[in-house]
Image (cartoon, coloured by chain):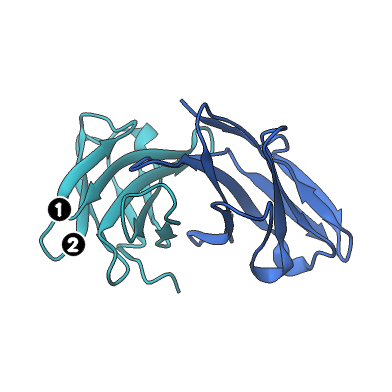
Chain colours: A cyan, B blue
Amino acid sequence: DSGVTQTPKHLITATGQRVTLRCSPRSGDLSVYWYQQSLDQGLQFLIQYYNGEERAKGNILERFSAQQFPDLHSELNLSSLELGDSALYFCASSASSLGNQPQHFGDGTRLSIL
Amino acid sequence: AQSVTQLDSQVPVFEEAPVELRCNYSSSVSVYLFWYVQYPNQGLQLLLKYLSGSTLVKGINGFEAEFNKSQTSFHLRKPSVHISDTAEYFCAVSHSGGSYIPTFGRGTSLIVHP
């Protein structure tokens, strides 16, 4: 058990819709990362938050947004969904934002767009 | 910029045989290196990490990896694999000196046959 909790585990929705994925980091971790995993693109970094503030951005689409709340949980919002957004979305957390800190991953949310 | 190449997308091996999963990286600065394992329907788990010091790093489940700076490699090895080692393995690199997002390789699927 990594200590990182993601909900929901599965999400099925239609094109054009909006969804929210939730992540609770491991206790004590201040940094939260969001990744998208698909067969063709591999593991793609989307965005990082550290102690409530956005710290780094990766290949995140403008239709996607995220935030980290004062209690350190984070939400990833995906809007105007397209078929290509179907993927596994992982949240990871680490104690700090330094490069020597390993990340602890949740079990992911599998998003299926019909 | 840094990059990670996992040379084999799939490695089939028989149970109790040795295995090596290859990882090469490129970076213009000092690096931290990680191997993660992903079992089906789960998130990534840290296997081992190299931060500094001894170039031979031992991890969980009998795995070890050797950092070779001259060849910019961090290959993962296990002397005798089990069926339960069947999983996806990811190499990741981040750099020293502050906040930096790790770059993950595309992954190697280890398939252990009885």
Residue A32 lies in what quarter of the image?
bottom left
Q: Which residue is mark 1?
A: A52
Q: Is residue B33 visible?
A: yes
Q: Is residue A18 visible?
A: no
**Quadrant assignment for the C terminus of chain A:** top left
Residue A6 relative to residue B30: left or right: left
Return the x and y of residue B49 as percentages of the image width and height: 57, 56
What number is the disc on residue B50?
none
Please state which of residues A17 and B33 is positioned toward the viewer in this rendering: B33
Residue visible at 59% across and 48% down in the picture: B90
Sequence-first tag of 1 and 2: 1
Return the x and y of residue B50 as percentages of the image width and height: 58, 53
Q: Which residue is mark 2?
A: A72
Residue A18 relative to residue A93: left or right: left
| Amino acid on which the number 1 mark rests in the picture | Gly
Tag 1 subunit: A
Is the residue under label 2 in contact with that under label 1 (CB below 8 Å)?
Answer: yes
Return the x and y of residue B13 as percentages of the image width and height: 85, 54
Dot 2, how many residues are within 10 Å of its Cα: few (below 14), some (14-19), or many (20+)?
A: many
**Quadrant assignment for the N terminus of chain A:** bottom left
